[in-house]
Image: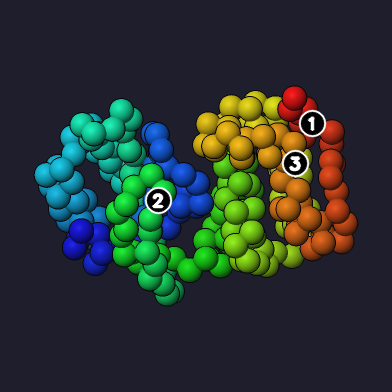
């Protein structure tokens, strides 16, 4: 897609998770939004049914539907992004044989963005993305006081967060793992930065037995 290769870059942690059903991803826009958005709608309209398209204060949103798949795909694009540098990467999925060459935000910047997202919106999917990046060798690079705040957010996650929100994003084997272990790898990385390794700060993290 020429217009997206030239005018947008992929910036989203959902590349850390399998996109099988209704899901969004967030490229950052690097060109004037009005012209870019119009061109993008025309191009995508050649291949998909556009169910919704809206310009919001901070984002542009398009929802697409393909006749080949039962669910829709929601694209959310951040406006007014300032990117210092980008990398190139090949995107692929085990659910398809297609491969796409993309311009992406470097993983350390992705990590920083996901940390801020977790602190602001306190969603379990952001914790999952951070732990995924840690497993891939990306450093968290946060001061001790911020590490403690992140640990507190993780500790406040509820049973519903694990059973409903996170489970809807993962395969069956991953669901079992997180129900048994929560975010032990992430906690370990952050606990060392905070000068401690708190497994449970408030007692709210669910301890779920899987028979």
Expressed as whole percent of the image width and height from the top left, the position of residue 13 reads 50, 52
Disc 1/disc 3 C-alpha distance (Å): 8 Å
Look at 86% across and 53% down and name the residue there.
197
Q: Secondary structure at mark 2?
A: loop
Expressed as whole percent of the image width and height from the top left, the position of residue 10 reads 38, 58
Front in this rendered view, residue 63 or 55: 63
Look at 67% across and 34% down and name the residue there.
176
Q: Nearer the viewer, mark 2 or mark 3?
A: 2
> On the rendered structure, is 178 left or right of 14?
right
Any mark on residue 49, and which? none
- Whichever of callouts 1 and 2 sits on the residue coming sooner in the sequence is 2
Disc 1/disc 2 C-alpha distance (Å): 32 Å
**Residue at the spot of label 2:** 93
Disc 2/disc 3 C-alpha distance (Å): 26 Å
**Residue at the spot of label 1:** 207
In the rendered image of this protein, does residue 106 appear above or below residue 35?
A: below
Q: Within 10 Å of the Cα at label 3, are there few (<14), some (14-19), or many (20+) other Cα atoms?
A: few
Expressed as whole percent of the image width and height from the top left, the position of residue 122 reads 62, 41
**Residue at the spot of label 3:** 181
Q: Secondary structure at mark 1?
A: loop
- Whichever of callouts 2 and 3 sits on the residue coming sooner in the sequence is 2
Q: Is residue 31 visible?
A: no
Q: Is residue 170 visible?
A: yes
Q: Within 10 Å of the Cα at label 1, are there few (<14), some (14-19), or many (20+) other Cα atoms?
A: few
């Amino acid at each position: 897609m020429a217009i997206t290769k030239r005018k947008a870059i992929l910036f989203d942690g959902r590349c850390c998770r399998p996109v099988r059903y209704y899901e969004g991803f967030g490229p950052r826009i690097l060109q004037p939004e009005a012209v870019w958005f119009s061109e993008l709608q025309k191009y995508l309209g050649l291949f998909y049914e556009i169910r919704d398209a809206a310009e919001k204060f901070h984002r542009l949103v398009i929802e697409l539907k393909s006749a080949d798949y039962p669910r829709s795909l929601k694209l959310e694009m951040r406006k007014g992004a300032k990117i210092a540098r980008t990398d190139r990467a090949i995107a692929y999925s085990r659910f398809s044989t297609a491969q796409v060459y993309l311009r992406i935000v470097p993983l350390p910047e992705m990590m920083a963005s996901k940390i801020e997202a977790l602190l602001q919106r306190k969603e379990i999917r952001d914790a999952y993305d951070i732990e995924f990046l840690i497993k891939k060798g990306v450093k968290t690079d946060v001061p001790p006081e911020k590490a403690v705040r992140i640990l507190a957010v993780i500790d406040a996650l509820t049973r519903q967060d694990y059973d409903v929100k996170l489970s809807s994003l993962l395969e069956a084997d991953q669901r079992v793992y997180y129900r048994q272990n929560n975010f032990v790898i992430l906690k370990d990385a952050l606990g060392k930065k905070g000068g401690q390794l708190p497994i449970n700060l408030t007692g709210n993290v669910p301890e779920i037995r899987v028979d």
